Amino acid sequence: MQVHNTLGNKKEELIPEKKGLIRMYVCGPTVYGPAHIGHARTYIAFDVIRRYLEYKGYKVKLVINITDVHDDMIAEANKQNTTIFELGDRFTKQFFEDMKALHIKPASVYPRVTQEIDAIIETIKLLYDKGYAYETKDGVYYDISKFAEYGKLSGIKPSKSITGTRVKTDKYEKKKVQDFALWKKAKPNEPYWESPWGEGRPGWHIECSTMSSKYLGLPIDIHGGAVDLIFPHHENEIAQSEAAYDVKPFVKYWLHTGFLDIAGQKMSKSLGNFITVPELLAKYNARVFRFFIATKHYRSRIDFSEEAMKHAENTLARLNDFIQRLYEVELAGKSLAVEPILSKARQEFELAMDNDFNAPKAWSAIFALETEVNKLMNENKLTKSGALRVIEFLKEIDSIFAVLSFEKKMPDLNEEERRLIALRDKLRKEKRFEEADKIREQLASRGIILIDTPQGTKWRKAR
């Protein structure tokens, strides 16, 4: 398997530190509000990656952190006249509900910052004692001049960079503007914990260094997140972790998801195109959105729109109709005709996914399978055993994507509809095709699609 490593900006063979085990860390939410669909894109993408690794036989230990103390949380809690603890509990619960609704498998561990303060303080002490950190009136800062390789992930040179952080920049006696906070001393009406440097709370970046190493060990095989976390968050994680824990590399493979735009524009509250996951799920089927994301390359920039979702809905409905048609095959015999098609589809699918999880090309193999098997059905060459083999294969593929429906639909025609189908068959035998076509149209208006086969008339409900 080849993965695109952001560190070095090239594809590399995936070789885990421990045979058969992938230790994976994905940056989680800051829980001061509901997740938006950009977050959902990242978590779905890494869910697909995790599921494919499991499909390939790996055991995956996945850690996703919960940031429940942060500048944004404090501001929002004050705005709502509540505490960060109540706010964090409320939106952590919302996050788990959203992930379940999107059919995302639970992580192995979800550590919360407020429950890991002691471990975070120990990491800061390691950096302080080794001379990588210094104390000011405002807090404890990481001195990036002490880490010679700072910038190796992002390519951003410290001399030319700005802080680039979503956290409010502190200016109290910092040696360099790019130095970042490890510990922030408490200000009035802020939550705080005791530390060797006085009452305060962790900076943003230090939590991921601490929790990833605590729950996964080092080095981590895969560290994931959205592309906007490369700098400064992931850059700072490397500087902290490699300095504190004397390990290089801290992470073997850095994987980053691309941006999600809304109808060609960057999503933002100021543009009025900000969509939360609950808002998404109130309007769209979760599997349709998953399919929309899962058919794109995880590193690509994608555009969410009504048209894109409609296309995803129609394509997914077609695949589910294909599955229903497979259930209806009754021809006896062995499945010889379908075996070469399945073998080719699996080979092409895995070749694509093994190449940096190339989902678009992998789905092309599934669509080609659909075309070939439909041709066999149309020519009355697909046996029931062959149809079941195709369904079995699609279930394996869907263990990765979690988008298809395998519930066998039971016939539910009423007496009049059955009478009309029988009358149409009689008219066709009598070559009264114009009258037969009128019955087809009449049934279509009721959402019943007729399919003429060598075994007689089949039907399905329109979606």
Image: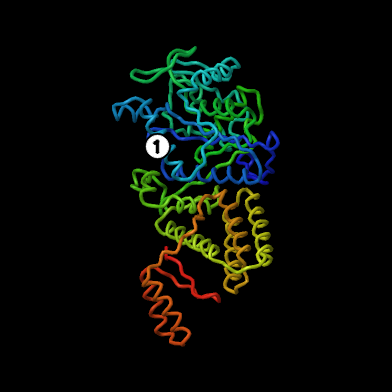
Classify 390 as above or below 425.
Answer: above
Q: Position of residue 213 (x, y in %)?
A: 59, 27
Q: Which residue is mark 1?
A: 94
Q: Nearer the viewer, residue 413 or 76?
A: 413
Residue at the farthest front position: 415
Disc 1 is placed on an element classified as: helix
* Residue 42 seen: no
Residue 381 quadrant? bottom right
Q: Position of residue 21 (x, y in %)?
A: 66, 36
At label 1, counting other C-alpha atoms closer than 10 Å, the crowd grade (few under 14, some 14-19, many 20 or more) is some
Classify 374 as above or below 158.
Answer: below
Q: Amino acid at mark 1?
A: Gln
- Residue at the image point whose x is 52% and y is 63% from the top: 322
Residue 264 falls left or right of residue 364: left
Tell me the quarter of the image containing the C terminus. Answer: bottom left
Q: Nearer the viewer, residue 192 or 60?
A: 60
- Residue at the image point whose x is 36% and y is 29% from the top: 87
